[in-house]
Image: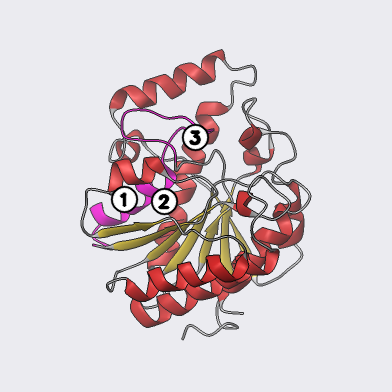
Amino acid sequence: MYGANCQPVKIVTHPLMKRSYDNTPAGAPGRLDTAFEVLENYPQYEFVEALRATERQILRAHDAHVIQEVRHDSETNRTGLLYEVALLAAGGAIQTATLASEGNPAFGLIRPPGHHASRDSYWGFCYFNNIAISLLDLKACGLIESAFVLDFDLHEGDGNINILGHMREFTIYNPRGHGDKSYLADVKRALDASPDVDIIVASAGFDQYERCWGSNLSTNAFKEIGRLMYEFSVDRCEGRRYGLLEGGYNHEDIGINTYAFCSGLKGE
């Protein structure tokens, strides 16, 4: 049922995410262009247009004043797009998670990222915590009770930990290791030690890349991370797996790295 050639990977995104919405590296012009260009060339990737999250969905993860502050930031921002794009990112994360809960491998090609957004604050180019919003929505809808969060971004997802870390049913792991071999071994150890869960999700940060800020992992390592998630999902959670874009600032290569990860997630 979950073989590599059986299912297309659903890519959840929105045209508005191609546009610059703030002056951070995450919102920079052209950041996602190569990801769109590469994935659009392959029929096994099926694009799904993101829909806005509702305030009720966001409030599962954040205090009400966070919504007001993001709206205010958007009103004072030169583009005026920030709040709209942040709602689309959160909503796209929910759609990605829902597709995955139905057994479809899925990736949220979304921005702004979210793993530095805590219940009552945000920083680090993040506004709403897409991982937490998506998982808490699945839980509220009765689709899951537990999850493994693999956060392979260069920076620890303090927002993921702040919102989900006190909940025993959610396991959060930020791998460590210098170079492909060490890093992948750490990922495998963590997955092997995990209890059975209902779904696995990645905070997918391609800033670990050897030609990005982390100077650490090759493109092939991202494919292997996806493949390890695929194998874990088949063995432990009925094939339910997805990823959401976090960091990654090498505009030229974010496309090949996203494709590599999604290929592994598909089981190739």
Compared with residue 109, is residue 90 higher up or lower down, i.e. above or below?
A: above
User: What is the chief secondary structure element of the magenta stretch?
Assistant: loop
Q: Kindly indicate the quadrant of the structure image that contains residue 235.
A: bottom left
Q: Can you identify the residue that label 2 sits on?
A: 94
Which residue is labeled 3 in the image? 126
Dot placed on the residue nearer the N-terminal end, 2 or 3:
2
Say if mark 2 contacts mark 3, CB within 8 Å. Answer: no
Say if mark 1 contacts mark 2, CB within 8 Å: yes
Q: Residues within 10 Å of mark 2 (few under 14, many from 20)?
A: many
Q: How many C-alpha atoms fall within 10 Å of the one at disc 3: few (<14), some, or many (≥20)?
A: many
| Amino acid type, residue under disc 1 in the picture | Asp
Quarter containing the C terminus: bottom right
| Distance (Cα) linking label 1 and label 2 | 7 Å
Numbered disc 3: secondary structure: loop
Inspect the magenta stretch and tell me whether residue 139 lies in it.
Answer: yes
- Place of residue 136 in the rendered image (x, y in percent of width and height, measured from the top left): 29, 50
Image height check: is 230 above or below 218? below
